[in-house]
Image: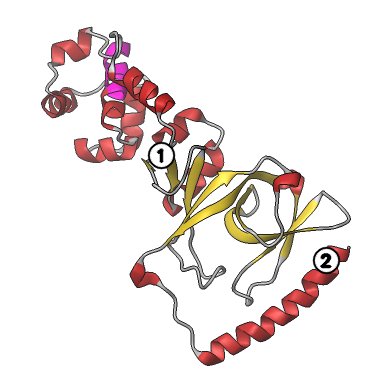
C-alpha cells in the first residue's frame, strides 16, 4: 500500500496542487486524501481510476512502481530550478489558511503546500505574502495581500514601518510598529485606522515578524471615506500620537 500512497503524493506535487485542490478534483474530502498520502488508508479503486485517467498512468504502475524513484524525476528538476532561480517563489497565506499557518509555520511540508507566485519588481530573497482582513489598516482595504520578507530580530525593526506580526494570542496581524527607547522587550503595534487603539506585545510572544515590501489590492476594493469620517480620524490620530509619545518614553 505504501507505494501507491507515495505515488498519489508524488503525482499531486507534480501538478503543484494542494491536498484540498487535488481532493476537490477527485471528489473526496481533503482528510481522506491526507489519510491516503500518510498511508493510514488504502485508496479505493474508483479513486485510482480517476488518478490513472488524470495523469495517464496505469493503475498497475501506481500499485507496483515508485514513480518518484527515477533519475532526473520531476520533483528533483523542480528543486534544481528553484535553486538556480535568482527570484524566489513567494508563498501565499490566504485568510482561510491563517489558522493552519499558525500551527504549521515551522513545518516544511505545510509551507510546501502553499500556492506560490512571483513579482518582477522583487529581487533575490525569501518572501511570503499574507492576505489581511478587517478595517484596522484603512485605507489599505480588507482582502489586500501584503508581500514581505522575514525580519531577524530587534535591531532590524524600524519605527513606524508596517509589518506582519504573528503571536499565539493575536494570530496574524498587519500593523505599524513602534519600538520603546528604554527596553527591547516590547513593541507597540499601531493601526492606520485611528479608531483602533495601539497595544503592546512582548518580543518573547512574537513567533514571526515580516516587513512589508509590497501591498497588492484589488482596484474595486479601495475604501472611500466621508469628510466627516476623515476629520474624526485626524482627531483620533492626534490623540494616538500623544499616547505613543508617552509609551516610547516608558
Quadrant hosting residue 50: top left
In front here: 210 or 6?
210
Tag 1's secondary structure? loop
Give coordinates of residue 84: x percent, y percent: 41, 25
Is residue 41 at all visible to an observer of this figure?
Answer: no
Give coordinates of residue 237: x percent, y percent: 68, 79
Are discs 1 and 2 less than 8 Å apart at CB? Answer: no
Give coordinates of residue 40: x percent, y percent: 37, 21
Q: How many marks?
A: 2
Q: Over which residues does the magenta segment extend?
A: 1-10
Residue 216 versus residue 223 in the image, above or below: above
Q: Residues within 10 Å of mark 2 (few under 14, many from 20)?
A: some
The residue that disc 2 covers is 247
Give coordinates of residue 6: x percent, y percent: 32, 17
Q: Residue at x 59, y 74 (%)?
A: 193
Q: Residue at x 51, y 47 (%)?
A: 99
Left or right of residue 229: residue 33: left
Quadrant hosting residue 38: top left
Q: Quadrant of the N terminus?
A: top left
The residue that disc 1 covers is 114
In front here: 107 or 128?
128
Q: Residue at x 38, y 70 (%)?
A: 221
Amino acid at each position: 500500500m505504501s507505494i501507491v500512497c507515495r505515488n498519489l503524493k508524488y503525482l499531486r506535487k507534480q501538478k503543484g496542487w494542494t491536498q484540498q485542490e487535488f481532493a476537490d478534483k477527485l471528489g473526496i474530502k481533503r482528510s481522506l486524501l491526507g489519510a491516503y498520502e500518510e498511508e493510514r488508508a488504502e485508496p479505493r479503486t474508483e479513486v485510482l481510476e480517476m488518478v490513472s485517467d488524470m495523469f495517464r498512468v496505469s493503475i498497475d504502475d501506481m500499485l507496483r512502481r515508485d514513480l518518484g524513484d527515477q533519475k532526473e524525476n520531476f520533483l528533483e528538476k523542480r528543486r534544481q530550478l528553484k535553486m538556480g532561480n535568482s527570484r524566489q517563489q513567494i508563498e501565499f497565506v490566504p485568510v482561510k489558511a491563517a489558522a493552519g499557518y499558525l500551527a504549521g509555520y515551522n513545518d516544511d511540508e505545510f509551507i510546501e503546500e502553499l500556492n506560490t507566485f512571483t513579482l518582477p519588481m522583487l529581487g533575490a530573497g525569501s518572501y511570503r505574502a499574507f492576505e489581511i482582513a478587517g478595517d484596522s489598516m484603512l485605507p489599505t482595504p480588507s482582502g489586500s495581500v501584503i508581500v514581505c520578507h522575514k525580519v531577524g530580530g530587534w535591531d532590524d525593526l524600524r519605527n513606524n514601518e508596517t509589518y506582519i506580526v504573528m503571536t499565539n494570542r493575536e494570530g496574524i496581524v498587519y500593523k505599524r510598529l513602534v519600538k520603546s527607547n528604554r527596553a527591547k522587550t516590547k513593541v507597540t503595534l499601531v493601526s492606520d485606522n485611528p479608531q483602533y487603539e495601539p497595544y503592546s506585545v512582548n518580543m518573547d510572544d512574537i513567533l514571526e515578524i515580516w516587513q512589508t515590501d509590497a501591498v497588492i489590492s484589488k482596484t474595486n476594493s479601495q475604501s472611500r471615506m466621508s469628510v466627516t469620517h476623515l476629520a474624526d480620524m485626524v482627531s483620533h490620530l492626534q490623540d494616538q500620537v500623544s499616547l505613543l509619545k508617552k509609551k516610547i518614553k516608558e
